[in-house]
Amino acid sequence: KHNPEGDTEFLEDETTKIFARKVADHYSARTNQTLEEREASVIIHLKKLNNWIKSVLVQLYARRGDAVLDLACGKGGDLIKWDKARIGYYVGIDIAEGSIEDCRTRYNGDADHHQRRKKFSFPARLICGDCYEARLDHILADDAPFDICSCQFALHYSWSTEARARRALANISALLRPGGILIGTMPDANVIVKKLREAQGLTFGNSVYWIRFDEEHAEKKFNASSPFGIKYLFHLEDAVDCPEWIVPFHVFKSLAEEYGLELVFVKNSHEFVHEYLKKPEFVDLMRRLGALGDGNQDQSTLSPDEWEVAYLYLSFVLKKRGQPDRA
Ligand code: SAM
């Protein structure tokens, strides 16, 4: 790998860049849905459930006045969650130009849609960039340190190479204050690999999603020669269609430790729902978001196929080592 010309590294890097572009183009091309289109989606309850999970994470960890770094912020779907937590400052970064544009429109108030909500109460900086390649500590030198970093449904896009995974963690670590928190969600590799092993071939799924491995990467997985670059194609009806990478959680955990980020908890979404639906305030929140029917059952309005997709994800919380600056 480390030959003097660095050829292999170069080739790997070029392929990686092509894939990063594919992911960016995919998300960039996704236009904003109208409220009616959103409600008609076959995965509407899954989307609401995922919003609930993210809201619970925000409510558990955000404090009034916090400086927040939202890595891979997308169209800014979490801006309202941060506003409710009364944060003091927000920086959002995403590789997809189209998504950052939508995020900017949402933050500034969408004139075309006669946005009724009041302006967000915190100042924000929105940047288009590759969070897994750029030195964000340079770009955000004047904005750091942050109290919270959030990376929702996106950290697995860094797992195409070790260099990118390390860049992601180095960026997060460099920008968080000591005692600062990283909250996130990403695919649960244990579940995906278990499903692959149970599948007849290299593809599995249900009416709303499919995952397809190619021979080479499935083999790589089974041989466990490298925990990076294990690619699969993910299709989620009405949401995602792009290459993604397996993140073996034990590797993520130990790599994060190298960057001074210690695991607070990791929970599969099913476990997360069961645990936090024991708390009345989060049951209320679920009801307000419309992910829960009147029956008070956690998955009562999700179809079994949507509930199976929820099982593909996990939530994690990590803490930056060191003494907090403040009480
Ligand atoms: N975090 C948002 C949310 O929860 O609504 C968006 C999640 S979306 C499933 C994944 C996002 O990751 C997309 O907006 C995509 O553009 C972004 N992304 C993927 N690779 C990235 C990279 N290298 N740098 C920054 N953003 C990236």
Image (cartoon, grey):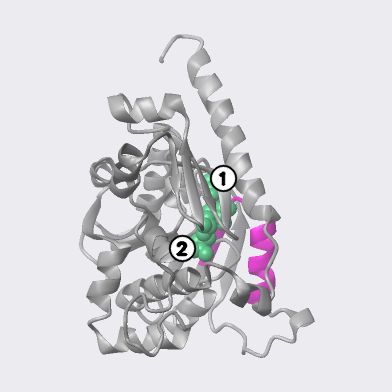
**Please, is residue 285 above or below residue 227 in the view?**
below
Q: Position of residue 81 (x, y in %)?
A: 47, 78
Inspect the image, locate mark 2, and give the three-letter code of the amino acid beneath it.
Leu
The residue pinned by badge 2 equals 69
Dot 2: element: strand
Q: Position of residue 63 (x, y in %)?
A: 35, 79
Verify whether residue 177 appears in magenta.
Answer: no
Q: Which residue is found at the position 31% from the left and 49% from the top?
A: 191
Q: Which residue is found at the position 64% from the left and 61% from the top?
A: 100
**Please, is residue 252 above or below residue 216 in the view?**
below
Q: Which mark is residue 242?
A: 1
Q: Nearer the viewer, residue 11 or 127?
A: 11
Q: N-terminal of the two: label 1 or label 2?
A: 2
Q: Nearer the viewer, residue 57 or 276?
A: 276
Q: Position of residue 175 (x, y in %)?
A: 40, 55
Inspect the image, locate mark 1, and give the three-letter code of the amino acid beneath it.
Cys
* Gap in angstroms between the C-alphas marked 1 and 2: 25 Å
Q: Residues within 10 Å of mark 1 (few under 14, many from 20)?
A: some
Quadrant of the rendered structure where residue 222 is?
A: top left
Q: Which mark is residue 20?
A: none
Which callout, 1 or 2, points to the residue nearer the camera? 1
Q: Which residue is found at the position 39% from the left and 30% from the top?
A: 218
Q: Position of residue 207 (x, y in %)?
A: 50, 57
Q: Residue furthest right?
A: 112
Tell me which segment is drawn in magenta: 91-108
Q: Residues within 10 Å of mark 2 (few under 14, many from 20)?
A: many
Q: Provide the major secondary structure of the magenta segment.
A: helix
Quadrant of the rendered structure where residue 33 is?
A: bottom right
Q: Nearer the viewer, residue 199 or 78?
A: 199
Is residue 126 shown to the viewer in this render? yes
Verify whether residue 102 appears in magenta.
Answer: yes
